[in-house]
Amino acid sequence: MLGAVTFRLSDLVDTPHLRLTVRAGARGLDRPVSWAQTSDLDEPWSWLAGGELLMKNGRTLPTSADGQTALVRGLAEEGICGVVIGLDAATPELTPAAVSLADDLSFPILLVPYSVGFAAIGRAVAGGAEGDHNRRIAVTERVYQVIRQSVNRRGSELALPQLSRDIACRLAVLDAATGEVALDSSDGVPEALRRALVDEIAARRGAIPGVLHVSVGDERALAVEVPDEEPTVLVAYEFRATPPDVVQLQHLASAMAVLLAQQNVRREHDRRVGAEVLAALCDGRLTGTDAVRGLTERGLKPQAAVLVAIAGGSQSAERHLHVSLGRRQVPHLLLRRGHVSYALVPAGAGPLAALRHRVGAQAVIGVSDVLAHPHRGPAAVREATWAMRTADSTPDRTARYGDVTMLSVLRDTEEAQVVVDRVLGTLIAYDAERAGDMVSTLDAYLRCDRSWVRTAAAMGVHRQTVVYRIQRVEEITGRRIGDTATIADFWLALRARDLLSPVERDPVG
């Protein structure tokens, strides 16, 4: 376990060749120094874990009292042990407000002459903390030893508790968007910390700096990004000694990436098995009592599950959909056929919100009625697909089968086929005999609110071609397109035809 650091700021001040002078915060000179780091950023603590000595070029010091006090307060609150300001001709004077605040916070401000380089201070800190440096190396070796053991023995559930003991704090691997557990072997964090973490990341629009400092009351936590398919953070909190430094946190993040990769391999296997199950359900091959029991064991009770059809989202996003749903504890089965992805999920707003979050705002989503029983699988496919095809006309690009206008009129394929034959039969026959585009032109014309120009653009033909084809539609069907009843009949029949249209099939994947 990481021991206490013994090299202190007072040791630096007492080193003659460094020529350091104390300008403010002298009561804090007994603070231990874990490392010395240069930075001229406005918020340098976003790349420091705490315990470091910041070395700052004097000409980048804010000139205003507000700017200087904000810097001092930020460094003190995030656990930086002190700041060294390099003096040169462009260094502004420290304002009385900054000096007074540093004294109140016991936050040391040290000044160093222009002739003394920061490298000399850095070497002094490294040499003084050599014992701690050796301990850091030992801890880093321990990190990778634990990971090797987890890979070889498949004991990844033991890795995080072991590392928490070695680093002398609690560790958690969380989804960056929700703060929920991302690694199965990780515990969650206290609710107040979870909310503070999520709010901080959201305020930064998902951008995570080198080290994200989160405070909840008197408690501090450090978060670093973990490379993974989904935005992920490693959180260190409840420190029993000195917090881990930036290098240790980055090593830990790399280790967590290995554990997540192992977990994702297992989940990908589960996804493929689930795709086979969902394919059987959609094709009507999953019908008996064993099917009910199998779905229930996966957390999907048929009487409380719906089938969702999705199209138009990012393919990479859909590939990672199973990871996203798994992190949000949403039971699911996934299947992609052609350009449509299907998901069997519990009914309710939560699973739909998780799906929407992953596939993006531009995707169209159709939701079936409740599955009720596995033998309704093929019907649920038709319902979800039909609803999906109408979703692009809804404000949130989501449609539910039972709510879509006019869909409730036709509750099965037999009724849908009767409407198609009665209203569109002659047009379909005409297109079949002459390889025509009368049905597709009529559909585009109604979808474009009977605009000649928009229909022509959608079809990729001349406006006059659209005018001619719609006139032919009227002649072939004997119906006048300007009549409201005719428009209603055509629209219902076209949507019924959508319901009956087969979806492109790809191998299960």
Image (tube, grey):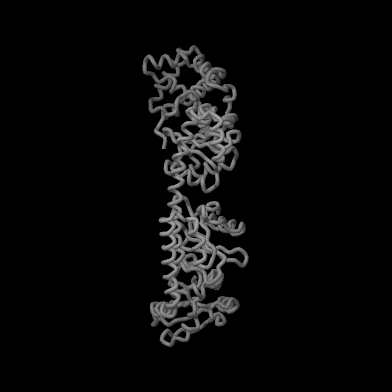
Judged left or right of residue 267, residue 103 is right
Q: Is residue 136 above or below residue 413?
A: below
Residue 263 at what x, y percent from top left?
Answer: 46, 50
Left or right of 349 on screen, residue 342: left
Q: Residue at x 50, y 37 (%)?
A: 343
Image spot of residue 61 (x, y percent): 48, 73
Q: Residue at x 52, y 16 (%)?
A: 418
* The C terminus: image quadrant: top left
* Whole-percent x, y for residue 429 in the image: 42, 14
Q: Is residue 395 above or below residue 218?
A: above
Q: Is residue 116 visible?
A: yes
Q: How many marks?
A: 0
Asked whether 372 or 425 is in front, the reply is: 372
In depth, the one of 347 and 278 nearer the eye is 278
In the figure, residue 179 lies in which quadrant? bottom right
Q: Is residue 389 visible?
A: no
Residue 14 lies, in percent from the top left, at 47, 86
Q: 49 or 460, which is in the foreground?
A: 49
Where is residue 193, by image quadrant?
Answer: bottom right
